Image (cartoon, rainbow, N blue to C red):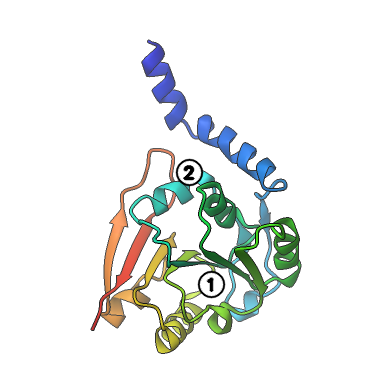
Amino acid sequence: MIARLWKSLKNHRFGLWEMRTAWLDARFGGYCGGRVATRFRHMGASDVHNMSYRIIHQAMSGLVVEPEDVLVDVGCGRGRVLNWWLSQGITNRVVGIELDPVVAATVKVRLAKYGNVEVLGGDAVELTPADATICFLFNPFDDAVLQRWHDAVLSRSTAPHLSVIYINPRHVTVFEKAARWTIDFIPRDVATFFDIAVMKLRNE
């Protein structure tokens, strides 16, 4: 009975993961949820929105972070992915990119004490570093901008390998058409509402 109750609580949408989300937000400086309507829809940007740490955990479960990896959250919003990486003890270079300068500035101040974290305000097409090896996207922009980001990243990449984690991959055809990626989909968790695609760039 206790085992069944414990399993139910862990799997329930409002169970242990929601409590963990609140705890991790507090640990890294305050509430990071909610949604902010974007002021940059004319630039193809999605609203600023954040997901539960459960989804981030699920998305990252298939990747091993190596010491030389550079992790980039493209459209970092209020910074929950950055929080998660820090909570896992990751000391690699971590970059968050957020188009909204007000949101970016808030995250930058909140995580200022972490020397391995850099938060940039501006266009990810221009700002994604050439040495990025793991990029995390929560559907941050429309297909046209994703195409430009994809092409720009590949054109200047100096990394020995590149993986892209794409939550709610509405425009995954950008990667499919390029024919340069191995694409795997992670099955939805019982409390996960988004598909997750994990792309790995094939060496040519």
At x 55%, y 55%, the residue is 81
Residue 67 is situated, as x and y percent measured from the top left of the image, at 42, 62
In the picture shown, does residue 51 fall above or below 76? above
C-alpha gap between disc 1 and disc 2: 22 Å
- Residue type of the residue flagged with mark 2: Arg
Identify residue for label 1: 141
State the SS at label 1.
Answer: loop
What's under tag 1, amino acid-wise? Answer: Phe
Position of the N terminus by quadrant = top left
The C terminus is located in which quarter? Answer: bottom left
At 41% across and 53% down in the image, what residue appears?
60
Left or right of 164 on screen, residue 84: right
In the displayed orientation, state which residue is furthest to the left.
Answer: 204
Q: Quadrant of residue 175?
A: bottom left
Task: Give above or below for 17 relative to 161.
Answer: above
Q: Which mark is residue 115?
A: none
Question: With 187 as the anchor, is 18 left or right in this view?
Answer: right
Q: Which mark is residue 54?
A: 2
Q: Extreme bottom residue here? A: 155
Q: Quadrant of residue 165?
A: bottom left
Q: Residues within 10 Å of mark 1 (few under 14, many from 20)?
A: many
| Image point (62%, 57%), residue name | 79
